[in-house]
Image (spheres, coloured by chain):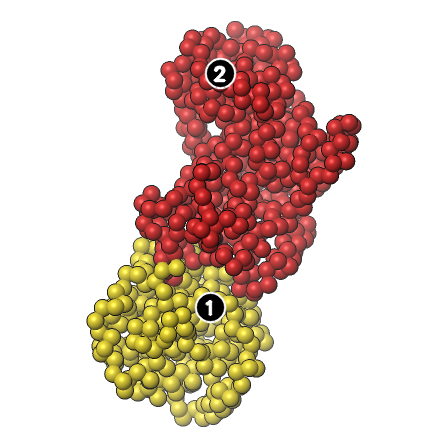
């Protein structure tokens, strides 16, 4: 997967575009969702839509900070593609009767804070930080969630949609891991220190305050929906496996930090981490809605409509 | 303008057996008309202007889209030898500029010199005779001792290279070929492109169309345009005391000249102008995400700086939407973007500018020893002081390679080129030369200097623009002040040229 030719990848991305209109949203299969599944699935799909959408904003920030034009274009496409995934998932929700026309699901507080943080700080974040966090989120959350969904839902349209989404995601990950390795390649200790220094920043600390509870919250949510915790952890391990495959990848300090953190997330016995973070989850949930800042206008770009 | 129209009809039929002339001017745009005036003023009347269209005006004839206007003040975007005291606005519209060109044709009696509907198909230099031969589409063959190629760098427009655009079932309109009969009212319209034409079209279109969607790939730096209706007293003053207008023109010239320090080179002034641009954006656009979409991520000056006070407000009108998703293709009904949505439209307006010729030539140009200008320019166009090209004697270019200003009026540069060409043509005629050909080593040395200086400019600072070839070679802009450009053209140095008597 790693060491791909980014110029060829850009061509591949350009030639692999698809539209919501390519999918027959009225095809039979929607009835396969049982009444028992529906409430759980509604919450699950809402989270998924928002994770895609937050990921999209992350790619937008990366496009702004990309070191060269090819990567800038790739991230610009990935930003749009994550939006497309969120749009397609919204369309699925509508197909399953979970949303009225023109509605979008309500994001939970953790998501709201993530959106606010991304909108305020992501553009100024060191490129290396986002370059490692995004693949981690994509593998761990996206990967695990999509796989779980396909195990649970037999609607063929859902499978068609996620075949396309996974196809896109494989390219996102290919680029993500290549970039992580590029960042670790030929770096001396001094280079690595230089790479880390800009990450020592109050904004990053604020980001952690949002990101840690978000992960634990997602873990709780998926477990509540019946996804075995091991599957989520399996996906997180995949990040460590692929990212750490080469020496260059392992040398990337951000990969190290994120891998180590993921291990901590997976290990419920690490009480020094989980007790305060779980407390943060509960605190976050209790923030009254009216105290949360207004959602930025990019959130309103979500649409389940194939045509505009 | 009226007389120009009347006379146009008399000149539609081309002469069948044109005899050799002293000068052939190709193109009756700003450059060609200016050249003709300068030749007449120098006492050279044995010339002809070949124009492919049936009307003078060139770029300003073609670009009559709603909102089309100059973005340099009219008092400077005009010829100093044909000042117009009656400009109705600080930045005049295309129609008025076209009227100005028409009035020059009338005032200087140029109509009899123009051959309309005469599309030049090639140029060949006959070394023995020392004459250029120009075969035209209508079968005529024109011969001249010298040629002024005033066909312009912005003469040809092209649809953007987006898959499927030819299969769009609705109306496709290019900004440079506006269809004035198309009624936009009640229509859903897309605008592709966000350059100099788009920022002028969009504010007008949102007034007419039901909905306008603007597709942006790269945002430009936008500065406010201090446009105003010129007061009556000013027109009367300029009319009565031309010196007053000249003084204003001079002030405008030096004002723009000082902007070179920020626009051409990276300096504290560049930072100040960028801050000004950001202030303009913040003042006009309240939404943070939209401001982010509209904030350029390259240095100011790298691409053409846009001048508009009504573009940002237009984008925020309820019937307008800015889309920054990458365009995948055009379908029969609309534009498909990478966020998975097909945006459907009645019409697509392409404000995607022009095909600027960096390498090729508009028609084959054959010089000494059958050399082809397109071959000589295959690695990027090069000339001597933007006017002459070695191996192509007695040929003068207007808006030739590296003659573009980024901060001042193109017509100021043009005047220097015209005067230089007159000097060359006078020399050919007075000394009865068969060939006046710039020495290749002189041209090479000149271009080494130009490219070295260009490397330090904002244009070559890393963005993509129509100033550069896809390889990043800058064959378009002049890296210096307008004053420097004019100074180098003040004198035609004999030692730089190979002079062959007849």
Q: Which residue is mark 1?
A: A300
In the displayed structure, B155 sits above or below B48; it is: below
| Residue lying at 43% horizontally and 85% vertically, measured from the top left | A216
Residue A182 locus on image (x, y percent) = 42, 63
Q: Which residue is mark 2?
A: B11
Residue B499 relative to residue A264: left or right: right
Q: Answer whether labels 1 and 2 touch (C-beta < 8 Å).
A: no
| Residue lying at 67% horizontally and 36% vertically, measured from the top left | B88
In the image shown, does B157 or B365 lie closer to the viewer?
A: B157
- Residue A257 visible in the snapshot: yes
In the image shown, does A56 or A277 lie closer to the viewer?
A: A56
Q: Are marks 1 and 2 on the same chain?
A: no
In the displayed structure, A307 sits above or below A239; it is: above
Circle count: 2
Marked residue chain, label 1 = A
Residue B339 locus on image (x, y percent) = 38, 62
| Residue lying at 31% horizontally and 76% vertically, measured from the top left | A97
């Amino acid at each position: 997967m790693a060491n791909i030719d980014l110029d060829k990848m850009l061509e591949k991305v350009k030639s692999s575009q698809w539209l919501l209109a390519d999918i027959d949203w009225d095809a039979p299969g929607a009835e396969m969702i049982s009444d028992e599944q529906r409430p759980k699935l509604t919450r699950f799909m809402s989270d998924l839509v928002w994770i895609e959408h937050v990921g999209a904003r992350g790619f937008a920030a990366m496009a702004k900070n990309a070191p060269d034009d090819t990567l800038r274009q790739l991230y610009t496409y990935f930003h749009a593609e994550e939006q497309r995934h969120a749009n397609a998932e919204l369309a699925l929700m509508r197909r399953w009767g979970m949303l009225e026309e023109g509605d979008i699901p309500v994001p939970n507080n953790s998501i709201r804070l993530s959106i606010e943080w991304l909108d305020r700080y992501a553009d100024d974040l060191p490129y290396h930080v986002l370059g490692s966090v995004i693949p981690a989120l994509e593998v761990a959350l996206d990967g695990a969630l999509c796989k779980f969904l396909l195990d649970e839902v037999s609607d063929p349209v859902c499978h068609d949609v996620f075949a396309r989404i996974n196809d896109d995601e494989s390219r996102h990950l290919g680029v993500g891991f290549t970039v992580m390795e590029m960042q670790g390649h030929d770096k001396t200790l001094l280079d690595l220190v230089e790479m880390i220094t800009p990450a020592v920043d109050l904004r990053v600390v604020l980001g952690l305050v949002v990101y840690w509870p978000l992960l634990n919250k997602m873990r709780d949510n998926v477990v509540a929906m019946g996804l075995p915790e091991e599957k989520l952890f399996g996906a997180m391990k995949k990040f460590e496996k692929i990212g750490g495959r080469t020496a260059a990848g392992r040398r990337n300090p951000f990969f190290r930090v994120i891998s180590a953190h993921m291990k901590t997330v997976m290990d419920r016995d690490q009480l020094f981490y989980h007790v305060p973070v779980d407390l943060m989850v509960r605190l976050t949930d209790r923030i009254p809605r009216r105290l949360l800042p207004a959602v930025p206008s990019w959130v309103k770009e979500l649409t389940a409509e194939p045509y505009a | 303008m009226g007389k120009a129209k009347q006379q146009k009809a008399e000149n539609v039929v081309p002469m069948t057996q044109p005899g050799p002339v002293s000068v052939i001017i190709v193109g009756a745009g700003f450059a060609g008309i200016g050249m003709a005036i300068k030749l007449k003023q120098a006492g050279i009347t044995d010339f002809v202007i070949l124009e492919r269209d049936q009307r003078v005006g060139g770029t300003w004839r073609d670009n009559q889209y709603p909102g089309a206007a100059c973005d340099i003040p009219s008092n400077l975007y005009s010829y100093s030898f044909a000042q117009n005291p009656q400009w109705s606005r600080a930045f005049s519209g295309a129609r008025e500029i076209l009227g100005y060109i028409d009035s020059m044709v009338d005032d200087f009696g140029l109509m009899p010199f123009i051959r309309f509907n005469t599309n030049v198909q090639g140029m060949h230099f006959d070394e023995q005779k020392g004459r250029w031969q120009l075969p035209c589409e209508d079968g005529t063959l024109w011969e001249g001792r010298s040629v002024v190629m005033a066909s312009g760098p912005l003469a040809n427009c092209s649809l953007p290279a987006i898959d499927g655009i030819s299969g769009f079932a609705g109306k496709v309109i290019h900004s440079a070929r506006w269809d004035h009969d198309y009624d936009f009212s009640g229509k859903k319209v897309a605008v592709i492109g966000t350059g100099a034409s788009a920022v002028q079209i969009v504010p007008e279109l949102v007034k007419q169309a039901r909905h306008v969607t603007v597709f942006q790939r790269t945002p430009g730096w936008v500065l406010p345009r201090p446009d105003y209706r010129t007061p009556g007293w000013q027109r009367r003053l300029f009319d009565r005391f031309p010196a007053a207008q000249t003084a204003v023109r001079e002030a405008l010239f030096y004002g723009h000249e000082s902007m070179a320090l920020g626009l051409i080179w990276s300096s504290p002034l560049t930072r100040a102008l960028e801050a000004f641009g950001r202030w303009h954006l913040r003042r006009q656009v309240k939404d943070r995400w939209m401001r982010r979409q509209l904030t350029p991520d390259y240095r100011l000056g790298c691409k053409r700086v846009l001048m508009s006070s009504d573009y940002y407000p237009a984008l925020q009108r309820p019937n307008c939407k800015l889309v920054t998703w990458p365009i995948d293709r055009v379908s029969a009904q609309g534009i498909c973007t990478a966020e998975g949505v097909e945006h459907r439209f009645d019409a697509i307006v392409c404000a995607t500018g022009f095909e600027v010729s960096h390498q090729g030539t508009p028609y084959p140009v054959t010089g000494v020893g059958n050399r082809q200008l397109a071959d000589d320019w295959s690695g990027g166009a090069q000339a001597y002081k933007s006017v002459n090209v070695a191996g192509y004697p007695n040929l003068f270019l207007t808006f030739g390679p590296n003659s573009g200003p980024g901060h001042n009026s193109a017509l100021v540069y043009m005047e220097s080129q015209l005067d230089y060409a007159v000097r060359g043509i006078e020399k050919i005629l007075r000394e009865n030369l068969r060939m006046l050909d710039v020495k290749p080593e002189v041209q090479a040395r000149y271009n080494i200097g130009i490219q070295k200086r260009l490397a330090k400019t904002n244009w070559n600072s890393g963005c993509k623009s129509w100033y550069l070839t896809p390889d990043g070679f800058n064959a378009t802009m002049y890296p210096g002040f307008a004053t420097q450009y004019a100074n180098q053209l003040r004198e035609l140095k004999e030692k730089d040229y190979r002079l062959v008597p007849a």
